[in-house]
Structure formats: C-alpha cells, structure tokens
Image: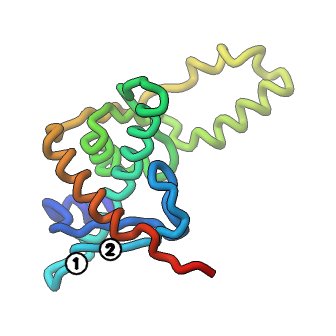
Amino acid sequence: ETAKLARSVDSTDGVYMVPAFTGLGVPYWDGRARGTIVGMTRGTRREHLVRATLEAIAYQTRDVAEAMEADSGIETTSLRVDGGAVKNNFLCQLQSDIIQTDIVRPVVDETTALGSAYAAGLAVGYWDNINKLRSNWQVDEDFEPEMDDEGADEMYRRWDDAVERSLDWAEED
C-alpha cells in the first residue's frame, strides 16, 4: 500500500522525515537526535508523508553506504538487500536512485532466518560446507538507477538539511 501512495505524488513536496526516534547512528552518531518532519504546509497530504518516510529509508541507506566507502576505500557497485521492506518495488528503485548503485533483491527476502537455518544445517552436518549453499542464493530483481546524479545529490542535500534540524534535540536527563 505504501508504494501505491508514494507513487500517487511526484515528490514529497518538500517534506522530509528524519526517523531519529532513539538518536541517529552512522554517520551522525548523535544519541540526542530526535525524529522530525520538516517542510509541511497546508497542502501536505498523507501521500507526501508516506513518500517522505520511504525516502528517509533510502537516505539512511546512502548514509551507511557512503560511510562504508569512506572507511574501506572500496566503491559500492551494488547492494544486496533483504527483509520485509524490500518487497516494496518503489523503495528498492528509490534506493537505487538515491545511492546511484544497483540494488539486488533476492528471491528469498528473509535471509536472516534463512542464514540461521543454514547455520543449523551446517552444524548438524546436513550440508558439508558453506560452498554448497552459495548456489541457493538467487536474484529476484536488480534495480538500476533511473535518476541522474544531480537529482539524487540535490534530494540528499535537502536530507542533510533536515537531519541537521534533528540533531542534539533531546535534553540531558
């Protein structure tokens, strides 16, 4: 349902949502940051808020991807994603656009549970070694960037502005 709502508008109409409910991690490391919604007007509709929330996931993913690149010196050429949210094609495409890299969704999207099952199977000798499991991982869909770098960077710049407003918000106990 969120994909349908998000697609029903062309943009967030300037609305940004920062989901810092218990602070922000990489790259901000601010435990006092708090959740904010900025840019709302009388014309803001729930569709804008839904889209802003999905965009926030993509921006936070870019935050982490850029931090990993900075720390490792290795360019991110693709990201493998999993979890319930990856069933949302709109979100996967948005992440590809914002990060400017391929987003690869597996056939089995709950890979944490699958990994636990694999670990148990390896432990009891069901499989001889991890190499026998590698061929089980299969691509469901590969999302490639459709947005240009400049558009992605402008949206991300405004995300940084919104994050700045959420930082150091909570008062000391």
- Residue 28 shows which numbered tag? none
- Residue 37 shows which numbered tag? 2
Residue extending farthest front: 172
For mark 1, give the secondary structure. Answer: loop
- Give above or below for 128 relative to 5: above
- Give above or below for 100 relative to 27: above
| Closer to the camera in the image, 21 or 133 | 21
Instruction: Give how far apart the Cα atoms at labels 1 and 2 are.
Output: 7 Å
Q: Position of residue 79 (x, y in %)?
A: 41, 33
Q: Position of residue 85 (x, y in %)?
A: 44, 52
In terms of image quadrants, where is residue 131?
top right
- Kindly indicate whether the residue at mark 2 contacts the one at mark 1 (C-beta within 8 angstroms): yes
| Closer to the camera in the image, 146 or 158 | 158
Q: Mark 1 sits on what residue?
A: 40
| Closer to the camera in the image, 13 or 85 | 13
In terms of image quadrants, where is residue 41?
bottom left
In terms of image quadrants, where is residue 28?
bottom left
Question: Which residue corresponds to the image point at 42% horizontal and 36% vertical from the top-left?
Answer: 105
- The quadrant of the picture occupied by the N terminus is bottom left
User: Looking at the picture, which amino acid does disc 2 mark?
Assistant: Ile
Q: Position of residue 75 (x, y in %)?
A: 37, 25
Observer able to see residue 94:
yes
Q: Position of residue 25 (x, y in %)?
A: 51, 55
- The quadrant of the picture occupied by the C terminus is bottom right
Question: Which residue corresponds to the image point at 35% horizontal and 58% vertical from the top-left?
Answer: 56
Question: Which residue corresponds to the image point at 71% horizontal and 38% vertical from the top-left?
Answer: 116
User: Looking at the picture, which amino acid does disc 1 mark?
Assistant: Met
Observer able to see residue 1:
no
**Other-residue count near label 2 (Cα within 10 Å), few / some / many at <14 / 14–19 / ≥20:** some
For mark 2, give the secondary structure. Answer: strand
